Amino acid sequence: MTAAHAPQFAIAIPMLNEAETVPVLLGGCVAAARPLGTFEICVTDDGSTDGTASALKTFGAANPDILLKIITHPRPAGQSAAVHAAVRAAEAPIIATLDGDGQNPPEDLPKVVGPLLNGPDHLALIAGQRVKRDDPLHKRLASKAANALRKTLLKDGTRDTGCGLKAFRREAYLALPYFNHMHRYLPALFQRDGWQVGHVDVSHKPRVAGASKYTNLGRAIVGLSDLVGVAWLIRRKRSVLPSETLISRPEDRV
């Protein structure tokens, strides 16, 4: 691929049994991304047992002008693993993520991608924060409690870290410590490495097909141990951060 046609950004999407969502979600991503520049779409099929793989191939065949990469896991590995695999497969320096269930409207992609395409180099993450969430009451209450506890312990300044709609610099993301469920702690992890983090309000849609892969109890069990681990990582941050490191050639020196 020539430099002129290299993707400026990638859209990374984790999917588990979302066959019915594929055409609408990916079509919306294409419509939102085209005005922003050259792009690629990297979708991780995280061990789906429905027709997700077939739906992705059908979309790719119907849209040959779109650079679509399909990453396949033999069995479900979780959202963080699926996102990480898609980011590694991407070539673009900027990555946008959104959930594969269609609840993150693709039309909000410019809100998270735009600031990184045009912003300063020290800005590494734009995190979407959902307003007027279209989820059941019990799910909203559980999320509110978890976010309040996280903000108190990590002081990451983020109202809604669970929103899947984000954009970040690929190299900065791949330098972060990788662990399962890390996608819920990206603002704190980026700040730990000295990067600037921005926030934007985004909308939220009801799920139109498929079923949620999470339960409140499941999130609470893994969330507590993760929260303690991330708090430890922040306390043990490096004295020289990746964002402070300068690389030069000998001939550049005066």
Image: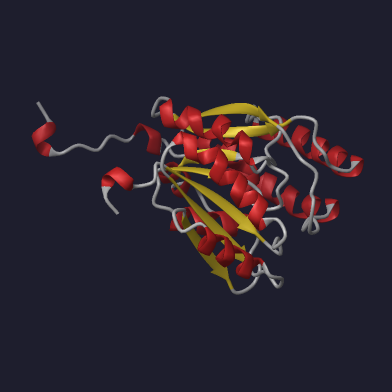
Q: Which residue is drawn at 28% across and 34% down?
A: 246
Q: Position of residue 119 (x, y in %)?
A: 43, 25
Color encoding of the figure: secondary structure
Q: In which quarter of the image is residue 50?
A: bottom right
Q: In this view, does 199 lie to the left or right of 192?
A: right
Q: Residue at x 48, y 60 (%)?
A: 69
The N terminus, quarter of image: bottom left
Q: How many marks can you see? A: 0
Can residue 240 be seen here?
Answer: no
Q: Where is residue 127 in the image (x, y as percent from the top left)?
A: 60, 34
Q: Where is residue 182 in the image (x, y as percent from the top left)?
A: 61, 49
Q: Is residue 61 left or right of residue 240?
A: right
Can residue 72 be seen here?
Answer: yes
Nearest the viewer among 61 and 51 is 61
The C terminus, quarter of image: top left
Q: Residue at x 63, y 65 (%)?
A: 55
Q: Quadrant of residue 133?
A: top right
